[in-house]
Image (spheres, rainbow, N blue to C red):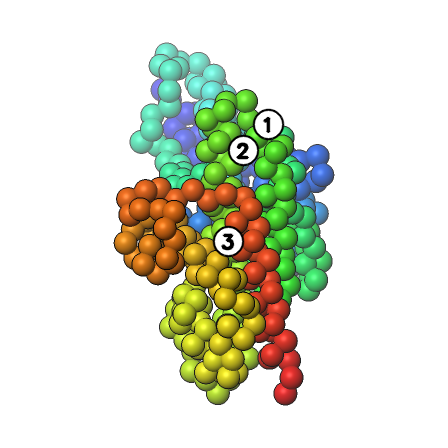
Amino acid sequence: MFDELLRELRRLEGTHKVSVSIASDADGYLDRECPSEECQFEFKVHDDDWRDTVRDEEVFCPFCGHTAESGDWCTQEQAEHLKKAALEHVQQRIGRAMNRDAENWNRSQPSRSFISMTMSVNSRPQQILLPPAAADPMRLKITCPACACRYAVIGAAFFCPACGHNASDLMFSQAIAGIRNALDALPSVRAAIPDRDAADTTVRLIIENGLQNAVTAFQRYAEALYARFPSLSAPRRNAFQNLKEGSELWNGATGKPYSAYIDAAEQAALIRYFQQRHLLAHRQGLVDDDYVTRTGDTTYRPGQHLVVRESPVRECLSIVETLIAAMASDTMTP
Ligand SMILES: [Zn+2]
Ligand SMILES: [Zn+2]
């Protein structure tokens, strides 16, 4: 009775390719999202480069370096779009089969036991929602010096999506430029979000994100510079996230602690910023006893929430730039 339909359903079992196009933006860039659950970094890759330069087997997340096949980088919006298009395709085929049967078939829904479609859509932990008018000016466009792939990010980027290129000096300056770009765009971000509270929250997240990325950018470059001393054993993970520990390691390598490069006021400020990053990353921004003890920052009592402003983040950027440039020049001379 349902011969045609059953035949069609049997054909639908297994894997099917349905080609659905995903639109790129006005500049020809395609939205992508890191499939790593801890990351979910959103970025863009030029449509032509995604097709011609990026390899199917391996794509790199510009932020965390996670690698996955090229099919795994859809944004949640694109995944929804693909799911809908695939369902429509299936529904059309079933619809046609049912017409061919010309029988009394409950037309409401195809039985789910026949068609299984897997589409994992992750919940997003720390999402910054931005209207395009706010996101666009924050975006930093980058061309990889190694493979010429064009990509764009908001905030910091450390890897080329196509070839994984991560020359530490370039990635550092790129990350700092990305953070400054995002801070420069704050007025337009604010203007683009009509709801005052939502605008405040977004601006706060961007600033906090900038501080965290500034420390991460410093850490990664410092690790790379330290690795230029092959006789020294590798430091513990995240040692360069800690200023005191990093300075001791660097002193061991070069005979110079950080205090040889930056003055006391700059050191005190950096200690504060690195500790603030720690609070943002691990304590949801809540000030604890350790923070007050380590920084001597008496503007906060334990239990208060950190308030990170734009100008301190800019100060942090310029101090880490000064420090790391001096450290880098000390690795150049034989
Ligand atoms: Zn990632
Ligand atoms: Zn590249």
Q: Relative to residue 313, is residue 109 depicted above or below?
A: above
Distance of label 1 from label 2 (alpha carbons): 9 Å
**Residue situated in front as seen by the camera: 297 or 1:** 297
Sooner in the amino-acid sequence: mark 1 or mark 2: 2
Inspect the image, locate mark 1, and give the three-letter code of the amino acid beneath it: Ala
Q: Residue visible at 63% across and 46% down? A: 181
Q: Secondary structure at mark 3?
A: helix
Q: Are marks 1 and 2 in contact (CB under 8 Å)?
A: yes
**Residue situated in front as seen by the camera: 125 or 172:** 172
Residue named by callout 2: 130
| Residues packed near mark 2 inside 10 Å, few (<14), some (14 to 19) or many (20 plus) | some
Inspect the image, locate mark 2, and give the three-letter code of the amino acid beneath it: Leu
Q: Residue visible at 43% across and 76% down? A: 248
Q: Residue visible at 61% across and 72% down? A: 326
Residue 61 seen in render = no
Residue named by callout 1: 192
